[in-house]
Each structure stands twice: as structure tokens, then as C-alpha cells.
Amino acid sequence: MTSPSTLENGFPSANTRLALYRDMLRVRLVEEEIIKRYGEQEMRCPTHICIGQEAAPAGVSTHLRREDEVYSAHRSHGHYLSKGASLKGMIAELYGRETGCALGMGGSQHLIDLDAGFMGSAPILASTISVGVGSAWTAKRRGHDKVIVIYFGDGATEEGAFHEAANFAGVNKLPVVFVCENNLYSVHTPLEIRQPNRKISELAGMHGVRGLIGDGNDVDAVWRLAEVAIQDARNGNGPSLIELATYRWKEHCGPNEDQNLGYRSDEEMAEWVEKCPLARYEKILVEENQLSEAIITKFHLEIAQEIDEAFDFAKSSAYPKPEMLSRFVYPEMRESS
């Protein structure tokens, strides 16, 4: 079995690095506003906050084209936004309004924006992995050069669906990139009591998939890994699995802190907060004179305005009509000609 590669060399261009920073900042500010407003009880869906994990979608999505497809799981806000999907549609969906990206009937865990190539998220563990691989199979058979990216957490690699899909992708050299955001916990259960002492990325080789591993809180490192994996997939060289070490700051489901539950310590949290992907990158770019206080202020103001507009749009939108409840339960009947 081939050891996973870390790919230490190479950096994005200056413009790309600013875009990466802004993307992470935007996701962070959106999540913080959701947290701020969640207690108002108008967002009635469960929501999984991705603060602390912003580098993964930013670093991956910068290599993707509009027609490339992304599949996600329950903690999907960053994946959705970094792919260029509608912020207004996402916030309206959280508010359960008919202008939401899933028509107000899916909530935070069922985001979708086909125009942006965000094909959907779902809360059932590993459920979108095989769907994404099926889409990659279709793309290859039809001769498309699109790439399929599938995000999931460490817990999903314990499901049979992951291994079956990875095997199929490896055997058929499909244009798919598996991105495992390893945040060390499946809900409240730590990785070390769920899996043996080996890297998740080492599973890739057994399925004929290239294994890559890196610091999921270092957006430059993510960018490097994603560049290689996505180019390989697009050029017909087969699939890759990228394992990214990262950490969620908030509770598994909801906007609150949860160290009081005892499954992780204050010390562990503090250690990972020190590795904040946004603060780290801001410090680096400022020290390298690629980012100034004026640009930081400009980004904050632009994003704040966009967020305010999205929440105003959501709260002024109507709820779905009652007859929509059964619209997608059964196929629509067509009159015979």
C-alpha cells in the first residue's frame, strides 16, 4: 500500500491567496451570523456549524469550474458557499421559506444549487458518496471532463457505502475527489476508539485510489493537495482521497459550545483554536504584505452587506404553500395523449 503524499511545495498566486482569505472570511461571518440569530427561533431546522473547518472548501473549490459537481453531508454550509451557490437561497432555506434553495422544505442539511454545481447535501452518514461516484461514472461514460468532489467526515469512512464507492471509483478510474474532513469526532465519539491506529488516507490504496494527506487548517496546503487531485481526475488519471486534519469549534449540531459534555477538553479546544485557519492565514498574508488593514475592512463591509441582504430576503419571503408538502412524494401524473 502506497503511503499518502503531503505535497509540500508550491503556493497559490497573490490574487488567489486573497480570494482564499476572502472565501474563508465569508464562510466564517455567515456562520457567526447564523449563530447570532439562531436563538430567535425562526430557523427551526437543525444546523451544523463549520467554524474552524473553512480552509477545506476554500482550498478545494478554487480549482473547480462551475460545471464541476460537489456533494456534501450534514456540515455543508462551507462547501455550498465556496462552490458559489446562492447565499440568499441558503439563508431562506434555513428559515423554511419558499425562496430557499430546496424550496424551504429541506433545511440546513438538504442544501442544493444545481446552477452552481452543488448537487446536494444529506444527513445520512456516507449517503452522498455513492451518489457522487455514480455521477462521476456518468461523466466518464459521456466523455465529459467535469470533476466530482465528495466531502464527508471521518465517521463516514466506517460505512460500507464509502468502501464500495471508493472501490468502484478506483477500478474504473473515475474523475472523483474524495475529501475527508477528519475533525476527530463522530458526534461525541473520538476517532481513537472507533478506528485502528492508521491514517484514513491509507485506505485509499486498497481501493486503487491515490491517497493524500495534509493540514486541513492550512489553506495553502489544502490548495496544493486539491490542485493535484483535481488535475488528476480531470486528465483521466483516476480518483484521489484527500484526508484533511481539522476541528469543529461548536457542538456537533447547533450553535453552542459543548465542552461541558465532557467528551473533549478545554485544552484540546484551545489547541485547535490556536490553529484557526482564518487567523493563521490573515497573519501570514499581512506579514508577507499581501493583505492590509484596508483590504480586511473592505472585505468585512462587503460581506456584512451581503449577509444582511440575505437575511432580509429570507425573512421577507413567504412560507411554502401547504399543497407543496406532497408535491415530491409521488411522481407527477401526466395525462395520456
Image (cartoon, rainbow, N blue to C red):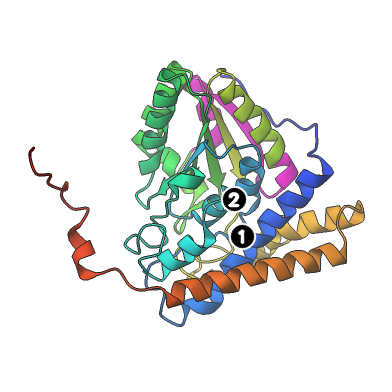
Q: Residue 177: horizontal and vertical position, in percent?
A: 53, 32
Tell me if I can see residue 260 in this picture: no
In the image, residue 278 sits, relative to residue 92, either above or below, namely above
Where is residue 299? Give x, y as percent: 74, 64
Going from N to C along the chain, the mark reached first, 1 or 2, is 1
Residue 82 image label:
2
Question: What's the distance in space between the residues labelled 1 and 2, CA to CA?
Answer: 8 Å
Q: Is residue 46 visible in this depiction of the protein?
A: yes
Q: Are marks 1 and 2 in contact (CB under 8 Å)?
A: yes
Q: Is residue 294 left or right of residue 303?
A: right
Residue at image point 43% right, 16% down = 171
Quadrant for residue 337, please give it. Answer: top left
Please state the extent of the stretch shown in magenta in the rendering.
196-221
Image quadrant assignment for residue 31: bottom right
In the rendered structure, which amino acid carries the disc numbered 1?
Answer: Val
Q: Residue under circle 1? A: 27
- Whether residue 217 is in magenta: the answer is yes
Q: Residue furthest front?
A: 337
Residue neighbourhood size for the residue with mark 1, other residues' Cα within 10 Å, grouped as few (<14), some (14–19), many (≥20): many
Q: Secondary structure at mark 2?
A: helix
State whether residue 42 is above or below residue 70.
below
Residue placed most toward the observer, 111 or 88: 88
